[in-house]
Image (cartoon, coloured by chain):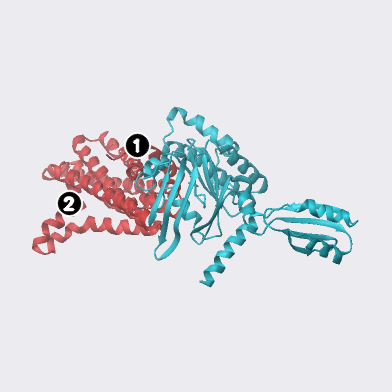
Amino acid sequence: MRSNMDMMIEVQDLTKYYGPTLAISRLSFEVAQGEIVGFLGPNGAGKTTTLKILSGFLSPSGGTARINGRDCVTESLEVRHSLGYLPETVPLYTDLTVSQFLRFAAQAKGVEAQKGNGELSRVMDACGLGEVQHKLIASLSKGFRQRVGLAQALINNPPVLILDEPTIGLDPSQIVEIRQLIKELAGAHTVILSSHILPEVSQLCQRVIIINRGQIVASDTPENLSRQLGHGSRVRLTVCGPEGEVVEALQKIPQVREVAGEGENRYLVVAANDLDVRPQLARLVVERGWELLELKAQEFTLEEVFLDLVTEEEVTEEES
Amino acid sequence: MTNLGNFTAVLRKELAVYFATPIFYVTGFCFLLLGGYFFYSNTLYYTLISFQAAQNPQLASYLNPLQMVFRPLFATLGVVLLLLVPLLTMRLLAEEKKAGTAELLFTYPLTDWAIILGKFLAALLVYAIFLAFTFVYPVAFGTLARLDWASLGACYLGMVLLGGACLALGLFTSSLTENQIIAAVTAFALLLLFWIIGWQQEIGAPGWKGVFAALSMMDHFDGFVRGVIDSRDLVYYLSFIFFFLFLTKRQLESRRWRA
């Protein structure tokens, strides 16, 4: 068995069936120490299943998952010692108060009694739970419950964090706070989080793994994914001039593949791969005596990458 | 080696949940209400017989408070246990599955045995609290009449073991389902069956008499309330408890594979 010390999470050919239904099929990926990896996919793609297997809650039907060099099935207890897990539904003991529950989590994770209080106040501070610590969990709002869920995952400072949809159900300012918190965790912790909020993933994660129908369709940095899309770069420009002439002139630039007029003097220019056509465009406009009002490179958003990959997959499947 | 590690974490959490929810107070109240009533009526009967014994000296030899008050009291409380224990145990594992907290519990670094033991001991402790309150009866009685405290000790040991056996079975049925009512009903049916299975020895097939008698909870309980600690009864209850805790462990193990 290959053992790579820098890799905190190693997943190979991971497969899971629920009865006859295939949930994930031969997933393989790795997450390096200190990396934040986003797990992206439409609902039912297998994100949660994969994370449940990594957390040791489910056993895979085939393949292996290793965390910190230890097998998630055969060495489950050791794996669980190095893990903080926030399940998707944020299950909590609603009959307990926040501090009772977190104290239980600390004891269950083997935090020593004399360090318990310090650890408790550390995670409560980090998650902003101080004011509600004596409240029953049943009486908390969704946002606070989410924070309690995150707090229990952070207890005992585990090297690996598995967060299933960590910002779902939070209001915008809470989302910003939690994202900031997750960002701060990077480096010291290895974080794998799932989400279907694309901007979140592109902001937070160094690497994105897109899965669809139980298979990995892409795995790269958000920037690379946008670039690799294969549709070249795009430039948006606003030019004061006769529309027909402008389109015609722009199309004559050799690198330009497509020009679309969008009305009110605005145009969208698509160029061949990885070429910056902005200098040529600017020169052309000036040479023709038109007025250049705006010139802006536009990157493909992760949404477009995502939709593209997911729909492409479906098209090929239908063809075959 | 089985690592029990931090089963006290589970124990404390379960106790906190017991004390935070009404079920503990309601079952405790019912248990003590019934216990108090039985103690009252048994004592009343005993006083009646003592007055008669004053006229009829032959009756006096039957006058034994343990036999006339406490033996029937604990025998009846044993039946009350069959009804109340499923209410104490139904929540233990079924609720974890229903509420999804199983996902937390089973991903914390706790062994299955630590979880089972923590939950079982929490329930046993709660039951022991109920039982401790019943100690008021012999103490009150003891101020007025002489009591054989050693035999009474055997009664209490029997009650603890019987309670432990019922709780272990209840914990097991709670592991089978995520519906608390199903867990309670199944526990009650099984407990009743184990309680009355001894009756079969009078009418059952000849070869099976011994088996039914050996399985009977009631028969093994009877020795304790008569003030006799028989090693067979001890072994019966301890293996009963271990057997059902073991079944619970197997049930938890299979969870990961069946999703």
Q: Tell me which amino acid carries mark 1.
A: Gly
Element class at badge 2 = helix
Q: Which residue is mark 2?
A: B219
Q: Is residue A18 above or below residue A152?
A: below
| Label 2 and label 1 in one chain | yes
Please indicate whether residue B190 sits to the left or right of residue A288 in the image: left
Looking at the rendered structure, the secondary structure element under dot 1 is loop
Question: Where B110 falls versus A281 (above or below)?
Answer: above
Image x and y of residue B169, in percent: 29, 52
Of marks 2 and 1, which one's residue comes earlier in the chain? 1
Chain at tag 2: B
What chain is tagged by disc 1?
A: B
**Which of the two residues, B11 or A10, is positioned nearer the viewer here?**
A10
Image coordinates for residue A285, horizontal then vertical, percent: 85, 56
**Viewed as shown, does residue A192 lie left or right of B31?**
right
Residue bearing the label numbered 1: B5
Instruction: Identify the residue at horizontal 44%, vertical 59% (top origin).
Output: A25
Question: From where the camera sits, is residue B35 visible?
Answer: yes
Above or below, B127 relative to A270? above
| Extreme-bottom residue of the structure | A319
Q: What hue does chain B carry in this figure?
A: red
